[in-house]
Image (tube, rainbow, N blue to C red):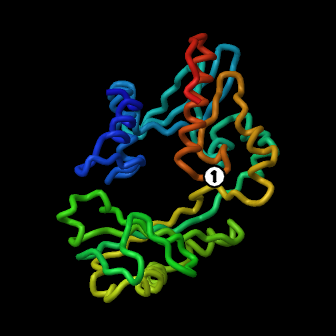
Amino acid sequence: MSAWAGIWYFCSRQTGDDRSDGYLSWPEGNGRLISELASSAGAERLKTQWLVHTLERDDAGWNVHVFDAATKQPVWLKARQVVLACPRFVAARVLADWRKAPPDFLKEFQVGPWAVANVTLDAHPKSRGFPLCWDNVLYESKSLGYVVATHQAPRADEHGPTVLTWYYPLTGDPVAERTRLLETKYEDWEALVMADLSPAHFNFEPMVKRIEVMRWGHAMIRPRPGFIWGGARQKAQQSLEGLHFAHTELGGLALFEEANHFGVTAAERVLAGLGRRSDSWL
């Protein structure tokens, strides 16, 4: 089954009560998409321990310089068409010409730090007010709330152990907030998680068995005023002689839909660059 066929199948299959779920979501999250795409590509074509550190253009195409972490050896590739799917601050370091002279529009791309916590509970918590659901937003909280990671488990397990994934964006100056993110101790994050979640549920603290906090210094693009409709995004979307860009931040919002749109756009540009005709999916 191709990746796209797999996505369509999982999206359209029926649930036990003969109703379509109507959304793309699986217990393993985007891991399902990754596994389907990997299966479609084939193991012999998929390189998972390669670090691309330099892209250079010459008259014959693109030179791709790689460090193979498995063998600890350098690898050199030659490509007619390349898709570079990474944040702009990474692309600015990988693309050799940009390392020497970064274009001005790169400065307009700002990414904000986030903290994400997985909270393991020995049972589903009882809510105050609206019943527990997949995406839960807390009233007057600075966090974005949490999702129930086991929301697609069988109904027999809906009262058993679960994991809540909690999201906290740091919305001030990015540099200052990254410093704050690094300097905040684990005990402080734990206290913040508990202070944020406890008011929403009865007898919450005794149910918590484990809290795991992950700090993301460059988590998501910031759609600040003037950026969405400014010229930086449009300039960043332009291909460079067979080099095509793809990433959520090209749309200015950290959404799956943006990743899908710009990934398809890049793929169609590759086909056009290779002289292969195809109907657009967009």
Image point (41%, 76%), residue name: 130
Q: Is residue 95 left or right of residue 31?
A: right
Residue in front for this viewpoint, 200 or 190: 200
Q: Is residue 63 above or below residue 108?
A: above
Q: Is residue 104 above or below residue 205?
A: above
Residue in front for this viewpoint, 79 or 161: 161
SS for dot 1: loop
Q: Does residue 71 appear in this view?
A: no
Label 1 neighbour load within 10 Å: few <14, some 14-19, many 20+: some
| x and y, in percent, of residue 117 in the image | 43, 70
Residue in front for this viewpoint, 182 or 211: 211
Quarter of the rendering containing residue 50: top left
Q: Seen from this angle, which residue lies furthest front?
A: 18
Image point (60%, 10%), residue name: 275
| x and y, in percent, of residue 52 in the image | 53, 36
Q: Seen from this angle, which residue lies furthest left?
A: 156
Q: Is residue 7 above or below residue 19?
A: above
Q: Is residue 197 left or right of residue 180?
A: left
Quarter holding the N terminus? top left
Residue in front for this viewpoint, 139 or 22: 22
Residue denoted by label 1: 253
Q: Is residue 98 above or below residue 149?
A: above
Quarter holding the C terminus? top right
| x and y, in percent, of residue 220 in the image | 59, 57
Image point (56%, 72%), residue name: 182
Tag 1: amino acid: Leu
Q: Is residue 117 left or right of residue 223?
A: left
| x and y, in percent, of residue 15 in the image | 27, 48
Count of residue discs: 1
Image point (64%, 30%), residue name: 244
Q: Does residue 188 appear in this view?
A: yes
